[in-house]
Amino acid sequence: MSHWLEDLKKAIPEERILTSLADRHSYSFDASFGEYLPEAVVQAKEKEEVVAVFKLANRYRVPVYPRGSGTCLSGGPLPVHGGIVLDMSQWPKKIDHRPDDLTVTVTPSVLTARINEEAEKHGLMYAPDPSSAHVATIGGNLAENSGGPRGLKYGVTKDHVIGLEVITPEGEVMRTGGGTIKNVTGYDLTKLIVGSEGTLGVIVEATLKLMPKPPAVQTMMVAFDHVRKAGEAISKTLTSGILPSKMEFMDQACIVAVENFKPVGLPVHAAAVVILELDGHPETLKVERKLVEEIMERIGAKEVIIPKTEEEAENIWHARKQVSPAIAKIKPTKVSEDATVPRSKIPDFMDRLQEIKEKFDVEVVAFGHAGDGNLHPNVLCDKRNKEEMKRVELAVEEMFKAAIELGGTLSGEHGIGTMKAPFMELELGEVGVDMMKRLKDAWDPNHIMNPGKIFVEKGQRLVLTDE
Amino acid sequence: MNEALRDAYNKTFDCVQCGYCLPACPTYETMERETHSPRGRINLVKMVAQGKATVEDLQEPIEKCLGCMACMTVCPTNVQYDQILESAKSVIESEQTPSTLQQKAEGFLFESFFPSSRWMNFLGNATWLYQKSGLRKVAHQFGLTQRAPLHIGKMEAILPEMPSPKQRQERVTRYMRQRPAKAKVAFFKGCIMDSVFFEANQNAVELLLRSGAEVAFPDQQTCCGALHAHSGKVDVSLELAKRNIEVFEEEGFDYIVNTAGGCGARLVEYRHLFDKDSPWYDRAVRFSEKVYDIAALLVELDGLTFTKPLQKTITYQPSCHLRNVQKVVDQPLELIRKIPGIRLKELKRPDFCCGSAGIYNMVHHKESMEILDVKMKDVCDAEPEEIVTSNPGCQLQMKLGIQREGRGDRMESVHLVDLLIEADPQSK
């Protein structure tokens, strides 16, 4: 071990190689489960440094795990086999706008929300809006192909990337795509790398697509006395010729939790609420608002709430944002899933969640981006209670199976990482997983690039305790 | 596991490691490591409790935390970081062997110096003598102040002019101008505030009197204990709290006012020092409910009209403890905006700590200056003639910042009450 550390010190300034126990512990976790102690943390600031790390990693067969702000919910940056955590968050931050092209070129350490803030100065927007956008780096968002509420209308991260500069696992510098919107030259390696969870290379620069910023938005909140009606309302709206920018769902347990946490006047007697945002020209919004109101009335919604002021609208969205912290008050540990189903299957999925909840006697609440079928079932538990955590593991496993049976997927936006790896074959089949593995072998022959993610390892199963 | 560690450990489970605290943390920004972020520190407390790391591993990250509590204002799960930090400090303190020179100096500073009004008076008087007698000039010429430990030299250079001992002795213990008074206010002096910024405290009294209140200085009051608690000296800090609670109970005061954001933050948190079933708990709650920052109280009394226009550009640098712990955010700005003619240019990041943080700028000078430089860039962009503060530590740190930027000829730092008095407020 000391051997590669000595070599590392020749390539990287010593103050950016962290080896003290306190520093190593500080990069042993992310926002998901598990902690794994790396042998060293390297804070890269230049391409040459990343190249050097990979050359050395291949020579000594030391695993390397790229990491942004460590907000990952699926274990992407966890150093599961020890080795080097490659901290990309301190890379010099650069945002280079080309408003005439409607593109922007950024370095990986830039916080995602900053890109949109800068774009707005030019009347443009960067559409992907994961709720952690003000903390997470764009590098991490690209690696995990993050989503967000606006994904319903504008798509997820991969739909906004047109070019990348990547250091391959063998330490070569490569460019993919370019600066144009259309580009069909060769395989689309850009989209292969986006969402590859740091297993195929490290992104050191990205060119992203911007869009015109909609001139106005209209928020609406609709309450239902049956979850099924909420599901129906989503399908009916989306087939009526209207495409809202956001359609968010909260079940009763979430509504009550938010009201107990910081009351904002949500309809606590409703079985579910759907919060919509329409965006576009103010005149169009007037018409669309009316149409949505009519749809909701026909379905038999309990109540349609239209905020009178911008402040009231903000309060509604604030309430939606409070769901995460509010439900954490029910029990301290939150297992946040993002199994996604075809939109029409949301009511069926809700029924299955109810069954699972009763079968394993666990606390389950559901909220999320219902407009695109991306629900966030959350199991609330206490990490310190081993017996309970075993039941939670079984419940989560059954949730994955339910989603797949309904024609859905294991993960809509969080990624596979460590936790969902054991279920990959269930969704993709033997051949599907094998083709992915062959790709991985070709790119990373020595398996030094973020090992232990996506692909299940021998004997691996879902574990939610630290031990 | 000792009690303090268990306390801290149990609270770490509220942290879901989402990382929302990272962009709010000044030390994460300047020190560029997760180890020096709230999430990193909370995780290390957990690791120590689980035996995966030692108290020694924890020491540097905990000691280099400013304690500005900006993280608590953005935490979505309401992690009680302030209490985790304080428990961690007391764990570190209890593991240390007291014998080094620095600890002796600290011991003197904390056990005799800060709680003693005699020492504080002496400090005020000695500083006055030092400034007036020409000793300052001699010391500077021989570079004596440069050699002093704890960077006293740099701090010394920015001390304001002291009031003479005569002025200090002339202060009475009770002021009343109208009968019946609108409110009965007890004044909590603050150690540094009342020695180094004696005049600001007198200005605060004047503002209260013109607002129609009567003001008393309870004699037996002592240090708030904030600096002790920040250094893990729980026992001393607890004794000081009890004494203050007792002293301010004696008369039926409506308010307990202070002019130092840091002290005020300690006073409003006294109840956290006691178990809920301790008889002290209720007394602490009653005490804390009466504690008001001067700005908040002036707004509440609403008794002043500012008569003299001040044609100058100022910016406001909030004290972190005033803003993040006492939650006094808008009142100082509300008062400033009432001054005719004034141009208020707000900072881009008012919630970013200035790096003063109690005695942080003395014991961790380099780290403090890195934070100050970030702050001063923001300040210089606003180009104010005056930086208005609400805590003595911040005011001194701002002076230091002005000096570092070489802007001493066109910028100065003042306490909010000094600015308000300058605008010649009259009773409504």
Image: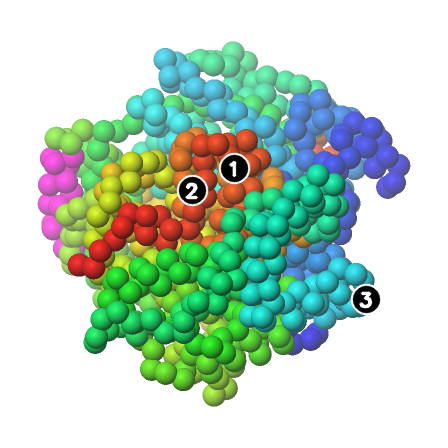
Contact, CB < 8 Å: mark 3 with mark 1? Answer: no
Disc 2 marks which amino acid? Ile
Left or right: A419, with A316 as reference point:
right
Q: Residues within 10 Å of mark 2 (few under 14, many from 20)?
A: many
Marks 3 and 1 sit apart, C-alpha to C-alpha, by: 37 Å
Q: Quadrant of the N terminus of chain B?
A: bottom right
Find the magenta span and give its range: A285-301
**Are the residues under marks 2 and 3 on the same chain?**
yes
Q: Which residue is mark 1?
A: B402
Query: Within the magenta stretch, is there residue A185?
Result: no
Residue A63 visible from this viewpoint: no
Query: Within the magenta stretch, is there residue A298?
Result: yes
Contact, CB < 8 Å: mark 2 with mark 1? Answer: yes
Q: Which residue is mark 2?
A: B387
On what subunit does the disc labeled 2 rest? B
Observer-side mark, 2 or 3, equals 2
Left or right: A61, with A142 as reference point:
right
Disc 3 marks which amino acid? Ser
Disc 1 marks which amino acid? Ile
Question: Which of the two labelled residues, at mark 2 and mark 3, occupies the earlier sequence position?
Answer: 3
